[in-house]
Amino acid sequence: MSRALMWKIALCSLFGMAIGLVGTALYFSNVEDTPKSGRHLAGAGGAKPFMMGKQMTLVQVNLRAPEGIADQDTQETTLVGWIRLNQALPGADLHFKWELPEGVQVVEGVVEDSWAGLQSGQVSETRLTVTGFSKESLKLVALHGFLKSGTSEVGNSAVITSRPEDSYEMVNSSGLATGFQKTTNKERAPLKGRILR
């Protein structure tokens, strides 16, 4: 290897490292520090959820089952939703509404409500404990978060499935389905319900 080529490689490597260090420093200088008081919005707990979706929307919604999804319809499943208000509108309250499929009953929690006086950047939490939402059959639960002012509504929603292993994304990423060939997995419970692939 010639000496000139070695110098070019060394300079390119140093230049790349310098760009990486500057980018990392800029990123971490813009990260907000956590408040020293340790106070949080009531009900949101200490940890903020990772908010998925479009970042420039007025409302962001995230939905999870932190203890997992029940194996049978008679067992309870707790669903937790976080709604972040990115931009407050004057005179508009933040509303939420759970959309439950047929056969899902509420054990504990409120299906529809609103929060008044939230500021931009605040995250609110809603919990719902249900039965009938389990791995036995494929069901979808949605949480809608929206600002309502008069007759107009602006918002976003999140969806959770009772059988994430049967979702289109999981089946395609696992390599079980290639083309039109179908394969079976004997460890999975039989599917009761329709799934479109």
Image: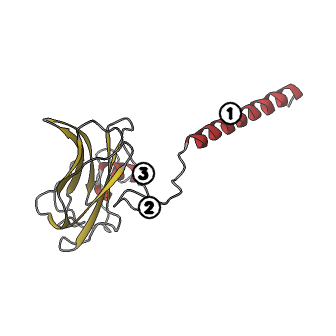
Q: Residue at x 63, y 36 (%)?
A: 23
Give the structural element (helix, strand or loop) at label 3. Answer: loop
> For this rendering, which residue is in front, 124 or 18?
124
Q: Which residue is mark 3?
A: 50
Find residue 71 and report its image quarter: bottom left
Q: Is residue 145 left or right of residue 46?
A: left
Crowd class of label 1 (few under 14; some 14 to 19; many from 20; radius 10 Å): few
Crowd class of label 3 (few under 14; some 14 to 19; many from 20; radius 10 Å): few
The reply to whether dot 2 and dot 1 touch (C-beta < 8 Å) is: no
Q: Residue at x 54, y 49 (%)?
A: 33
Crowd class of label 2 (few under 14; some 14 to 19; many from 20; radius 10 Å): few
The reply to whether dot 1 and dot 3 touch (C-beta < 8 Å) is: no
Give the structural element (helix, strand or loop) at label 1. Answer: helix
- How does the figure colour the protein chain or chains? secondary structure
Q: Amino acid at mark 2?
A: Gly
Q: Is residue 31 left or right of residue 151?
A: right
Q: Residue 63: horizontal and vertical position, in percent?
A: 31, 54
Q: Residue at x 39, y 48 (%)?
A: 51
As measured in the structure, the alpha-carbon distance from the residue carrying label 1 to the one carrying label 3 is 27 Å
Residue 46 is tagged as: 2
Q: Report the mark closest to the observer, 2 or 3.
A: 2
Find residue 128 and report its image quarter: bottom left
Residue at the extreme right of the image, as rendered: 3
Residue 19 is tagged as: 1
5, above or below 49, in the image: above
Q: Is residue 59 left or right of residue 153?
A: right
Q: Amino acid at mark 1?
A: Ile
